[in-house]
Amino acid sequence: MTPPLSWTIAWRFLRGRRSRLLDGTARAALAATALGVTAMIVAMALMTGYREDLRRKLVEGNAPIVAQPLLPAAAPLPEAKHLELTAIPGVAGVGRIAYGQGTLSAGAAGDGVEVTLRGIEPRPAAEARTAEARTADPEPAAAPAVGSRLTADAAQLAAGPDGVPGTVLGAELARRLGVGEGDLVRLVALGLADGRPRFRYRTLRVTGTFAVGFAEFDAAWVLLDRALVAGDDGEAAAADLYEITLAEGADGAAVVAAAERVLGPDWFVADWRLANRELFTALELQQLVLFLVLGLIVLVSTFNVGSTLVVLVRDRMRDVGVLAALGLAPARLRAVFLTYGAVLGAAGVALGVALGTGAAWVLTTFELIHFDPEVAAIYFIDSVSFRVRPSDLAAVVGFALAVNLVACAVPAWRAARVDPSAALRYE
């Protein structure tokens, strides 16, 4: 098939080497467009990767859905309600959790480190109820669970022969304390007794560590048996929380609605989106602003493409006159220069996409953006991955091509208005 005449002429202009100035401006336009697109892709991949890593690690540290009693009398949850929750389609498990505050110290740690106590049910206790509910209401196929990774086996949290309970520490916390598996640590926990604050002192044995990549969890969280944190022995009082783990691909909104029906008005049920709505709204707004700001780089680069067309029109003035004299309509002449600019801009965009996605892959694969513990405490995560989503890529490419065509429109319109007689006399 014969290509359109406008494409044929534009391609010959692109391949021509009659002007050093034209050659230089074309290369500058290509490079500027490529660099602008590269910057936008890397920036979008950075923000997308940061937001997705933050979301994933928040869920790994807590759970996709949390149920909290609004009144103390509503807890603990009756066993029948617990089984109803576990039987909701899409729920992989329900765990009873308690939180507390305290300080943890070891021989080399001086005054100790402020920590968050996460009291959990050891796995066998939680899995027994899950299995019972699945037997009553079996699902067609078991799906991978999406939920907190901050769990421990019963053996890790159980008391040893000497009566010392076990604990699992965040990896960074263990490093700060200078302790390893088998070492003893001293916990000072704040509790309540008869409505009054009371400090509780316990000796714990480190039985393991965890690392989820979220700075706050790895540097300040301690896993204990839930009974020690909630004060089931009568020394303290703490409200029960229930974390709902989802099966892979489950509809979180549907599970929240079903859990609200099961628990009733005395319970507050929220997923991770509601609990962290302000944070992720701010991150999305920041990504939009960053897209617009970096879009100015691409916008400026399109002026180079426009300048190339101006030089092309001047350099090919006699050719323009000949084409017009031979009867090439102004609209088709305009299409010649628009095609030239579009091909030049598209080549720059394609080069920018290749450079941007390649840079994102290298930065992610080799973890080149890695934070020290002090910096990780500010950004919440210890490393940043760069994820190029198809939607982000389409937005960058669409924006770059659109502004490129707009920049080419004025030079192409002026070329189509050239008087043939004047163009043929042009020197």
Image: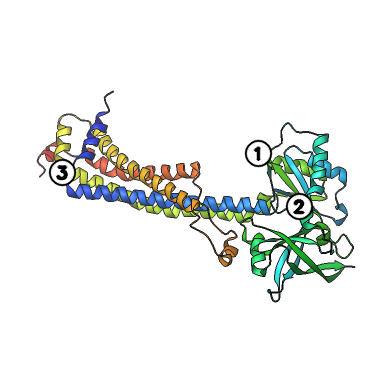
In the rendered image, the vertical position of residue 152 relative to residue 313, given as above or below: below
Q: Nearer the viewer, mark 3 or mark 1?
A: 1
Mark 2, other Cα within 10 Å: few <14 / some 14–19 / many ≥20 = some
- Quarter of the rendering containing residue 312: top left
Measuring from the top left, give residue 224's x and y in whole percent.
77, 59
Q: Residues within 10 Å of mark 3 (few under 14, many from 20)?
A: few
| Residue 9 placement, left or right of 188 | left
Q: Callout 1, which amino acid?
A: Gly
Q: Is residue 261 visible?
A: no
Q: Quadrant of the C terminus?
A: top left
Instruction: Name the residue beneath numbered marker 1.
Output: 249
- The tag earlier along the polypeptide, 3 or 1, is 3
Of residues 122 and 238, the one nearer the viewer is 122
Residue behind mark 3: 18
Quarter of the figure with residue 100? bottom right
Circle 3/circle 2 CB separation < 8 Å? no
As measured in the structure, the alpha-carbon distance from the residue carrying label 1 to the one carrying label 2 is: 26 Å
**Of marks 3 and 2, which one's residue comes earlier in the chain?**
3
How is the structure coloured here?
A: rainbow
Foreground mark, 3 or 2, reads 2
Marks 1/2 in contact by CB < 8 Å: the verdict is no
Taking 294 as reference, is 138 left or right?
right
Residue at disc 2, secondary structure: loop
**Is residue 59 in view?**
yes
Q: At 42% from the left edge and 48% from the top edge, which residue is drawn?
A: 358
Q: Quick check: 156 above or below 414?
A: below
Where does residue 225 sit, x and y in percent of width and height?
80, 58
**Disc 3/disc 2 C-alpha distance (Å):** 76 Å
Residue 290 location (% of width, % of height): 47, 54
Identified at 29% across, 47% down, the residue is 305
Give 266 or 372, whichever is nearer the viewer. Answer: 372
